[in-house]
Amino acid sequence: MKVVLTYGTYDLLHIGHINLLRRAKALGDYLIVGLSTDEFNAVKGKKAYHSFEERKILLEAIKYVDLIIEERSWEDKRKHIKEYNVDILVMGSDWEGKFDDLTDLCEVIYLPRTEGISTTKIKEDLKNA
Ligand code: C2G
């Protein structure tokens, strides 16, 4: 069984997130999502609209997602890859190269981002609506 792992905040769930999750799942048999906790979002300089629990419930409803774990720090990845016997770490291309240090543990693949959509854009567009 090929295990795929990806990470994110997944706030205000949108088509870019779904496109990433669909392609990530297609690379293996089991997709784990490391969901950023509210506390880690603060470290990332993000304040999610939805709480961790709400973002988790939304992700659990997506057929591509098999397991959701907490992402509490940048350093979590190495531990998670070993703990869950991950074969492929997948991230959107905005992270291109950022996790290549993990290639000693698993394959690292960056998938093209979906253009024209982001949580930030949604917030901006709604503000100006
Ligand atoms: N994404 C995408 N296309 C978009 C927006 C997002 O492909 N238009 C991808 C991102 O590249 C990421 C995933 O969807 O792989 C989740 O996006 P975010 O929730 O913005 O994740 P981020 O805050 O970048 O967190 O340790 C890694 C971080 O936790 C990643």
Image: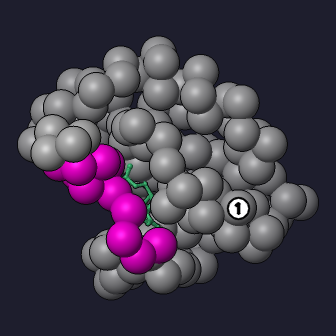
Q: In this view, does 52 lie to the left or right of 128?
A: right
Residue 87, relative to residue 45: is it above or below?
below
Side (left or right) of 122 relative to 8: left
Residue extending farthest right: 1
Where is residue 35? Give x, y as percent. 46, 37
| Residue sitting at the far front | 129
Residue 49 relative to residue 111: left or right: left
Between residues 42 and 51, which one lies in front from this camera angle?
51
Q: Is residue 70 above or below residue 79?
A: above
Q: What percent of the width, then of the height, locates residue 65? A: 71, 43
Residue 117 seen by the camera: yes
**In the figure, 112 relative to 99: above or below?**
below
To which residue does mark 1 refer? 22
Taking 41 as reference, is 23 left or right?
right
Report the front residue among 96 and 16. 16
Q: Which residue is drawn at 21% across and 42% down?
A: 129
Residue at the spot x=54%, y=68% of the render?
Answer: 90
